[in-house]
Image: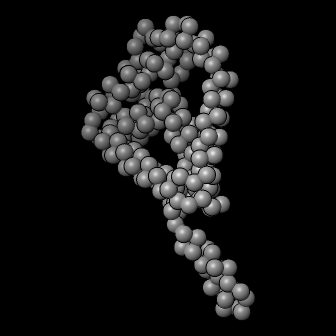
Amino acid sequence: MSKTTKSIFVGVIFAGLGIAALGAGPLLERLDSDVFKDTRLVILPVTAKAAIEHLPFGSGVGTFVPVYAAREPIETMVDAFVNHAHNDFLELWLETGVAGALVIIAFIVWWTSRVWISLRAPSSGRNNLILGAAVTTGLLLAHSAIEYPMRTQALACLFAMLCGFLCHAGASPAADPIRSRLSRTRTRSGERSLG
């Protein structure tokens, strides 16, 4: 692992510790109160049970609200409207069944391989950008396990763009199609190659 990669990891760890320290107060208050009053802890098992009931095909894309409403325990009902499972992976599994679970697994395998390749690549401006994309997509994936951040178009577009960066993990700069096309164009016109 290169020196730059190590310093990025150290920075991410310190940033995580800083965020944890700033968020510790509200978290400790929440743990001090009755944990079972948190509706997320009620939504997850109900959603998981519904997902198992709807195997292998799922309940259908966009059906979380009626499926959850039909199974919501009366004793845990609140005056809030439950529109998502607060876990994108679980909600996707409920709505798409085995196919959705396989897509999630395939994506996690692909993402992990891309991150591994980016960690092993030599340090350069390009590879550091790809490593930054790996860290940011990892944070969005982790956030998706407790919320639904990628249901907003801005974060979904950011995630897709960063996954595009990850597609180039480990590729040499010479393999960059834009750079090689630019190089060929300049060579034909008599300018010096960028290569």
What residue do we see at 40% from left, 13% from top?
Answer: 73
Q: Nearer the viewer, residue 180 or 9?
A: 9
Is residue 174 in view from this perspective? yes
Can residue 177 be seen in this snapshot? no
**Relative to 23, is 40 on the left or the right?**
left
Q: Residue at x 61, y 74 (%)?
A: 178
Q: Is residue 15 left or right of residue 69?
A: right
Q: Is residue 18 left or right of residue 36?
A: right
The image quadrant of residue 51 is top left
The image position of residue 116, as x and y in percent, is: 46, 52
Farthest residue to the right: give it.
191
Q: Looking at the picture, how far across and down is residue 49, in whole percent?
A: 32, 25
Q: Quadrant of the C terminus?
A: bottom right
* As drawn, 115 above or below 84: below
Instruction: Please say which color scheme the image uses.
Output: one colour
Please give the count of numbered marks on the rendered protein: 0
User: Based on the displayed image, in which of its 4 quarters is residue 124 positioned?
Assistant: bottom right
Residue at 51 percent across and 29 percent down: it is 146
Residue depicted at 55% across the width and 18% down the height? 80
In the picture, measured across the screen, residue 143 lies left or right of residue 94, that is right
Residue 38, horizontal then vertical, whole percent: 51, 15
Q: Quadrant of residue 26?
A: top right
Q: Nearer the viewer, residue 130 or 94?
A: 130
Locate residue 42, reporting x and y percent. Answer: 44, 17
